């Protein structure tokens, strides 16, 4: 479990490993990690069973029915034992489900994270009651689980914080782009037109100088327009990611082979991330990679964005050196995505990016 936590395994994998270890160590038939929800329900986030036996599905959500081990632990915030399910009169959805699994006895222990009751760990038997002392052993075991949960929640909070920072930066870029385009650029264009008018009416000895000044102003307007497009292009916000990427490909000094399959509109933060990733890679390929071609593939399937980019340059790219790849890594991971970089010396650079959109749909 320590290895899983250290390498940042998904919560489901960690909780499944916890349930497996717990069940085997306690000699139980079933084991589960249950998370309490704010609406007086409980969700199974980790499940283990000995052998091929019936089980409650992972992710199943049940109400905290009065008299169940889940409810008693939530109410007392202490370990609870139930040695004979047959002695329970009646029983709702949870008791009925456990009886159908053949459960005869169950022990539950609270899981407290940061002073709050997070959930409960359960072990169950299909024959005899669980041995005396099971509760104490489980309480010791939950200390490991608490460390795992705190790490998972810390990573989630960090990712959320990074995502908010990126959203704020994108919003600032949009404001700057709007101000550059709608205010500064238009004022400079008006000034250029006025200067051209003055040039036409000026004496011959001043006309050449005014023409030179107008040309410099025209070039400054073009530079300003390029800066505005680099911040966040109007085309991206108005028409979407595909036209924006085609424009990037046309402007690239290196030939770009672009393949896209995007059958839906993307949330703004994901469009901005894809755009800036492709812009950064094309810039790096032109300035540093000595590449002759860049292949860009974008596929959106359901709630998953898959972006594959590769060039035939000199390779050797390393995000740990503080290059633009580091900012790409930060952006992708802030949205819960993954980035795989392959860049052997002399073998070009390949990036495989996968970003889930489930949280934003």
Image: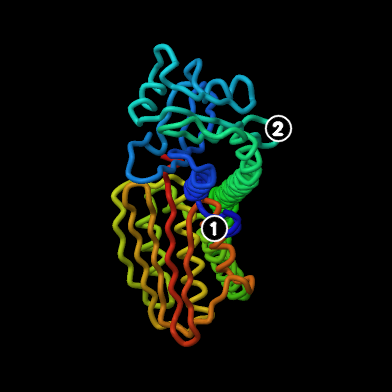
x then y, percent, for residue 57: 37, 36
x then y, percent, for residue 246: 36, 63
Residue 228 is labelled as 1
Q: Residue at x 32, y 47 (%)?
A: 302
Hey, which residue is sitting farthest top in the picture? 89
x then y, percent, for residue 16: 47, 46
Label whose residue precedes the other's in the sequence (1 or 2): 2
x then y, percent, for residue 267: 43, 45
Dot 1 falls on a residue whose secondary structure is: helix
Decide: is 152 above or below 322.
above
The one nearer the camera, 10 or 301, is 10
Hey, which residue is sitting farthest bottom in the picture? 346
Q: CA distance from mark 1 to mark 2?
A: 49 Å
Colour scheme in use: rainbow
The one nearer the camera, 36 or 129, is 129
Q: Residue at x 37, y 77 (%)?
A: 255
Residue 19 is labelled as none
Q: Residue at x 60, y 47 (%)?
A: 148
Question: Which quadrant of the figure contains the C terminus?
Answer: top left
Q: Residue at x 36, y 30 (%)?
A: 102
Dot 2 falls on a residue whose secondary structure is: loop
Decide: is 258 above or below 306.
below
The residue that label 2 is drawn on is 115
Hey, which residue is sitting farthest right in the picture? 115
Q: Quadrant of residue 74?
A: top right
């Amino acid at each position: 479990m320590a290895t899983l936590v250290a390498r940042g395994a998904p919560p489901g994998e960690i909780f499944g490993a916890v349930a497996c270890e717990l069940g085997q160590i306690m000699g139980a038939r079933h084991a589960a990690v249950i998370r309490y929800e704010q609406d007086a329900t409980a969700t199974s986030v980790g499940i283990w069973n000995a052998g091929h036996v019936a089980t409650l599905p992972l992710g199943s959500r049940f109400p905290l029915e009065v008299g169940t081990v889940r409810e008693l632990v939530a109410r007392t915030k202490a370990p609870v034992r139930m040695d004979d399910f047959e002695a329970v009169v009646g029983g709702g959805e949870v008791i009925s489900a456990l009886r159908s699994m053949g459960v005869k006895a169950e022990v539950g222990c609270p899981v407290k994270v940061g002073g709050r009751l997070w959930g409960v760990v359960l072990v169950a038997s299909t024959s005899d009651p669980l041995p005396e002392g099971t509760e104490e052993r489980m309480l010791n075991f939950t200390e490991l689980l608490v460390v795992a949960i705190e790490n998972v929640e810390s990573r989630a909070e960090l990712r959320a914080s990074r995502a908010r920072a990126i959203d704020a930066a994108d919003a600032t870029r949009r404001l700057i782009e709007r101000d550059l385009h709608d205010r500064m650029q238009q004022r400079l264009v008006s000034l250029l037109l006025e200067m051209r008018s003055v040039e036409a009416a000026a004496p011959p000895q001043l006309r050449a100088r005014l023409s030179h000044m107008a040309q410099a102003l025209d070039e400054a307007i073009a530079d300003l327009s390029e800066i505005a497009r680099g911040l966040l292009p109007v085309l991206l916000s108005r028409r979407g990611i595909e036209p924006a990427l085609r424009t990037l490909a046309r402007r690239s000094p290196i030939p770009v082979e672009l393949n896209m399959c995007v059958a839906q509109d993307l949330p703004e933060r994901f469009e901005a991330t894809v755009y800036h990733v492709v812009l950064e890679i094309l810039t790096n390929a032109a300035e540093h990679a000595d590449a002759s071609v860049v292949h860009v593939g974008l596929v959106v399937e359901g709630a998953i964005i898959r972006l594959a980019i590769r060039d035939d340059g000199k390779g050797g790219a390393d995000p740990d050196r503080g290059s633009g790849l580091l900012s790409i890594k930060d952006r992708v991971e802030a949205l819960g995505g993954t980035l795989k970089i392959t860049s052997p010396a002399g073998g070009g650079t390949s990036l495989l990016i996968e970003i889930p959109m489930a949280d934003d749909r």
